[in-house]
Image: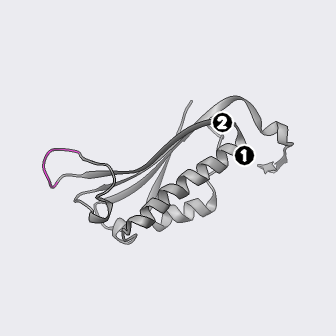
Amino acid sequence: MSRLGVVQEPDELEEDEPTRVIFSLIVNSGSPIAALAHFPARTRAPRPDDDYFYDIFHAEFEDDNWNTRSDKLDAAVNDALDLLDASGVDPDGLAAPGVHVRAFFTFDPGAETIQASVVKRLAGYNAAIWIDANR
């Protein structure tokens, strides 16, 4: 396995402490989105024309193996996007003014890789990628 051009032996992929990884996908819209009605939602304020937040997916896990974490993260993002696919929501509609798709990633600095195929899928839904560090 190679990371940043350095060949690593399998036992070098184990770390001293597990790294906590958090991923969530939300959709924020100024008005309700019928195709997302079955996802947990909340409004920012009690008026019906205020912003709607749809919680599409959330996953948290810890692991001390870089490869395992990378695979789990890839699976989590693809599971989230599969849920959006299955909802029948129009990806072009998610690019409309006032609609924001956000993918939040939290992990230790330098601990993870977001695979190109996942980034492309997120881009297909006009998703902004937010990355935060645990430390």
Left or right of 10? Residue 101 is left
Number of marks in picture: 2
* Residue located 66% across and 31% down the image: 18
Looking at the rendering, in which quadrant would you find the C terminus?
top right
Which residue is labeled 1 in the image?
Answer: 67
Which of the pair 20/99 is nearer the observer?
20
Does the rendering let one see residue 8? Answer: yes
Q: Please state the extent of the stretch shown in magenta in the rendering.
A: 44-49
Which of the pair 38/55 is nearer the observer?
38
* Amino acid type, label 1: Asn
Outermost residue to the left: 47
Q: Main secondary structure of the magenta part?
A: loop
Magenta span contains residue 45: yes
Marks 1 and 2 sit apart, C-alpha to C-alpha, by: 9 Å
| SS at circle 1 | helix
Residue 63 image label: 2
Q: Position of residue 13 (x, y in %)?
A: 78, 39
* Amino acid type, label 2: Asp
* Residue located 34% across and 70% down the image: 93
**Circle 2 crowding by C-alpha within 10 Å: few under 14, some 14–19, many from 20:** some
Magenta span contains residue 126: no
Vertical placement of residue 4 versus 30, above or below: above
* Residue located 18% across and 52% down the image: 50
Q: Position of residue 14 (x, y in %)?
A: 77, 35
**Circle 1 crowding by C-alpha within 10 Å: few under 14, some 14–19, many from 20:** some
Q: Position of residue 94 (x, y in %)?
A: 36, 65
Q: Position of residue 39 (x, y in %)?
A: 34, 54
